[in-house]
């Protein structure tokens, strides 16, 4: 039963991200008068198709993505074809999916930060640190700081850093008893210990029925975290290449594992930032100049523009996209193998 729930949660998250992406292509194509032959979730073979107007909406067997099939993608002679439009129009249609994923990321993160609160389980307290002096023990749960709820891990770090050298008050729970603890974060702590001396901590997610943050502040934080996301991805890749971090990639198996772990350990509410992260990751991967992704198609449109309208022959484009597809499938196989191996070894994706 638990596996079934995880699968359903995974497909719900994936469907939201994929459908929003493809909606970007669909909406802009319609706006520019391009005929949309098919809007599909998943990849063929087709399971179900419903025609509405000139477009067939399909549900397909392999539920790992989606597509919008436009009229005359390589044939400028076809009526209302994609290829008959100018380079600017085609660029907008191609990049619209990425834009929609970014917008979705901002919206989801803003909603999350508006309602989210967090509690923190203490994992390790360093000897002689302010936390130890204050009586903090491993297993204690930090509920509030200076009488206010904490929204996420970064919020905790920001509040502690902004109060270095000043006394703070934590509401701490231990053995179902709550107590106030006073400590002063160090301005120049020893390396690896942090200002309070808590060197290991884990988050316990929760949410409120009413907003815990001003909506404008939540939206601002949503924009900020979205802006910082590419840098975080880059840093994770650099650490992995340098041998200082875990593999920063996950395929469908890994994403499904992470979805289940987040829902079980933090709660369903925390699937919102997971979906936001997946949406932003899809935006980044799709804008890269890799065929046959959106970025790969955009490269050919830009080349056509720089060549003053001279197109790359469709057969050459098709060959490049086939090579790129083979490379992506190979990468997917490698990543999926790593995901399966991690599950067999009993390792978590989110820790």
Image (cartoon, grey):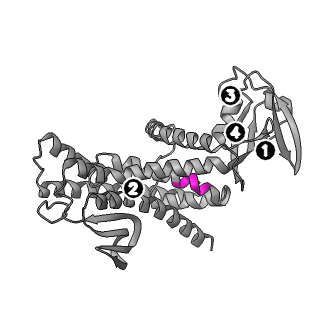
The mark nearer the N terminus, 4 or 2, is 4
Q: Which residue is mark 2?
A: 334
Q: Which mark is residue 143?
A: 1
- 37 inside magenta stretch: no
Which residue is drawn at the image coordinates 75% and 26% (left, top)?
Answer: 185
| Residue 36 image point, x, y percent | 28, 67
Distance between the alpha carbons at the discs numbered 1 and 2: 41 Å
The answer to whether mark 1 and mark 2 are in CB contact below 8 A is: no
Local SS, label 4: strand
**Looking at the rendering, which quadrant does residue 348 occupy?**
bottom right
The mark nearer the N terminus, 4 or 1, is 1
User: Mark 2: few, some, or many residues within 10 Å (few <14, many ≥20)?
Assistant: few
The relative height of residue 232 versus residue 184 in the rendered view (above or below) is below
- 271 inside magenta stretch: yes
Quadrant for the N terminus in the image: bottom right
Q: Which residue is mark 4?
A: 200
Local SS, label 2: helix
Which residue is drawn at the image coordinates 48% and 39% (left, top)?
Answer: 227
Distance between the alpha carbons at the discs numbered 3 and 4: 16 Å
Range of magenta residues = 270-275
* Of 216 and 246, the residue lying toward us: 216
| Residue 180 image point, x, y percent | 87, 38
Which residue is drawn at the image coordinates 12% and 50% (left, top)?
Answer: 312
Local SS, label 3: helix
Q: Which residue is mark 3?
A: 161
**Looking at the rendering, which quadrant does residue 63 occupy?**
bottom left
| Residue 339 image point, x, y percent | 48, 57
Report the side of 285 relative to 201 (left or right). left
The mark nearer the N terminus, 3 or 4, is 3
* Of 11 and 305, the residue lying toward us: 305
């Amino acid at each position: 039963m638990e596996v079934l729930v995880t699968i359903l949660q995974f497909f719900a998250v994936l469907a939201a991200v994929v459908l929003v992406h493809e909606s970007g292509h669909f909406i802009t194509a319609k706006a520019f008068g391009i005929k949309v032959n098919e809007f599909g979730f998943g990849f063929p073979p087709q399971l179900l198709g419903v025609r509405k107007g000139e477009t067939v909406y399909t549900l397909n067997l392999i539920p790992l993505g989606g597509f919008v099939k436009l009229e005359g993608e390589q044939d400028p002679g076809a009526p209302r074809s994609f290829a008959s439009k100018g380079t600017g129009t085609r660029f907008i249609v191609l990049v619209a999916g990425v834009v929609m994923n970014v917008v979705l990321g901002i919206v989801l993160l803003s909603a999350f930060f508006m309602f989210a609160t967090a509690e923190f389980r203490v994992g390790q307290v360093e000897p002689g640190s302010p936390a130890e002096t204050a009586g903090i023990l491993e297993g204690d749960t930090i509920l509030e700081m200076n009488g206010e709820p904490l929204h996420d891990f970064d919020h905790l770090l920001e509040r502690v850093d902004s109060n270095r050298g000043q006394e703070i008050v934590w509401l701490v729970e231990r053995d179902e008893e709550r107590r106030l603890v006073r400590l002063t974060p160090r301005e120049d702590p020893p390396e690896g210990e942090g200002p309070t001396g808590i060197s290991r901590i884990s988050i316990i997610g929760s949410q409120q029925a009413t907003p815990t943050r001003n909506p404008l502040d939540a939206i601002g934080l949503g924009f900020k975290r979205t802006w910082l996301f590419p840098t975080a991805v880059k840093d994770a890749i650099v650490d992995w290449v340098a041998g200082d971090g875990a593999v920063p990639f996950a395929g469908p198996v890994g994403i499904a594992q992470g979805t289940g772990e987040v829902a079980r350990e933090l709660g369903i509410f925390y699937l919102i930032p997971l979906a936001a992260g997946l949406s932003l990751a899809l935006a980044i991967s799709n804008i890269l100049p890799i065929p046959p992704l959106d970025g790969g198609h955009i490269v050919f449109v830009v080349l056509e523009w720089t060549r003053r309208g001279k197109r790359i022959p469709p057969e050459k484009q098709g060959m490049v996209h086939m090579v790129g597809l083979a490379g992506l499938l190979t990468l997917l196989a490698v990543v999926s193998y790593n995901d399966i191996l991690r599950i067999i070894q009993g390792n978590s994706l989110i820790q």
